[in-house]
Amino acid sequence: MKNITRVFSAAFLFCMISTGAWAQSELTGESAESYEKRMEWFSNAKLGIFIHWGIYAVDGVDESWAFFNDKVPYDKYMDQAKRFTASKYDPKEWVDLIEQSGARYTVLTSKHHDGFALWNTKAGDFSSKKSSKAGKDLLTPFVKEVNKRENLHLGLYYSLLDWSREDYPNKKRTEVRYNVKDDPARWESFKKFNFAQIDEINSQYKPELFWFDGDWEQDAATWDSEGIVSLIRGKNPNVIINSRIQGYGDYSTPEQGVPVVRPKGKYWELCYTINDNWGFQHADHNFKSPQTLLRTFVDCISMGGNLLLDIGPKEDGTIPEEEVAILKEFARWTGKHKEAIYDTRAGIPYDHFHAGYTTLNKEGDVLYLYIPGKPEESVDLKGIVNDVKRAWVVGSGRELNIKVYNKLSWSEVPGILYIDIPEEVVDEQITVIGVQLDGPIRLYRGEGQVISIN
């Protein structure tokens, strides 16, 4: 019985940390099998690129929040539409960069909380076509370009709330137009508008992922979250929907802060800025380094999640040079290490590998080690019950020397595996090592062996 209590398969550990995997879809009555099939591409994708683009890029103010929080007068904020040109917008250039970065999906803000739509909506008048200097539909050409790419999935962001509409209850943090319970007819007018825009996006573009936002201002019944999901899936049955729709989503979306422990749901995604803001801001030059962002990325995938990394184009449609440089470094690193990124699953607990992060291949018999910076002459793995067949540098295939110490024939405690890391194989950002095991990984999770000397 000793071994049963102390040695665990990775599959068992995975089940323990993934309870509630299907909980978010239970409300819809969908079978677990159907849910897993829909989520397959998302699980394998690992990296997505978020794009916040709207009139807020003109003056470089907080998207929508600038007027909501009384930082900028509403009229001044909206005046940006007259100067929003998209004059150098090249959707092919955008999508080329996104694809090259190693991202397998992308999410563009079709409409933020300010109500400005990037497509030629028939449900309202506030859009890039009707209300901005650009004078054209900016969403459709982007969608067409994404759909040309075999390995890139389309996601569209849509704000459920709309602080600009007179039939939406909230106007600013300090100002409310009406109470939903007191004026249900006015709320029904907004709901009709909301459903119309959602249906336009769904019917025209068939996104593979609907990224909702703003749900915190109303409950599920008020939004009619069930009705929204039913509307979308009626025409687009395989669509994936994020968690921000009051309990009817498919996966969770922590924002900015990397989870310290793995989220409870099986599928999750960290949305994360490349500097300090979602949209373009002229004064924000606090860009994170490529290694910082790549470490965040491997931290996410080591816990079985995705990273949705945000960029903020300028009002003319050009992407800031700093963001282009970062995505190009992602392209180099993901291209080199793709075998250790896509189609992997969560790695092993941190206790076993202190030098960095880990993932496993689908079969569980290859362990990938991610080592940021410059490692010492070797790294060590603890508690691996399996025999190790070999270790190699991902990207070059170079075989590495391995040695097991402290493995005692009379003890159930496995020895410590040391892997030599020559200086010449170290990647400038994060070095990745593959470790081939003799079967699905088994971990020793005990407290060690007491040796009596009496």
Image (cartoon, helix red, strand yellow):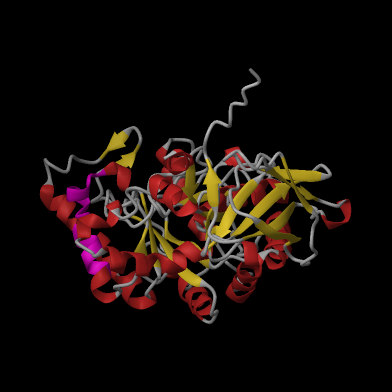
Quarter assignment of residue 145: bottom right
Look at the image and say whether residue 205 sits in the magenta stretch: no
Picture residue at 62% right of the left edge, 43% below the top: 414
**Where are the magenta residues, as a range?**
218-232
Picture residue at 57% right of the left edge, 67% below the top: 86
On-image quarter of the N terminus: top left
Q: Judge left or right: residue 434 versus residue 422.
A: left
Q: Is residue 274 visible?
A: no
Foreground: 89 or 294? 294
Foreground: 277 or 84? 277
Q: Position of residue 199 (x, y in %)?
A: 28, 70
Number of labelled discs? 0
Q: Which residue occupies the extreme top position in the image?
A: 454
Q: Position of residue 154 (x, y in %)?
A: 46, 70
On-image quarter of the C terminus: top right
Q: Which residue occupies the extreme front position in the image?
A: 454
Foreground: 276 or 170? 276
Q: Is residue 127 visible?
A: yes
Q: Judge left or right: residue 433 versus residue 65.
A: right
Q: Which residue occupies the extreme right position in the image?
A: 424
Picture residue at 25% right of the left edge, 62% below the top: 229
In the rendered view, tell whether residue 116 sits above or below residue 374. Answer: below
Look at the image and say whether residue 225 sits in the magenta stretch: yes
Q: Main secondary structure of the magenta part?
A: helix
Q: Position of residue 302 (x, y in %)?
A: 56, 50
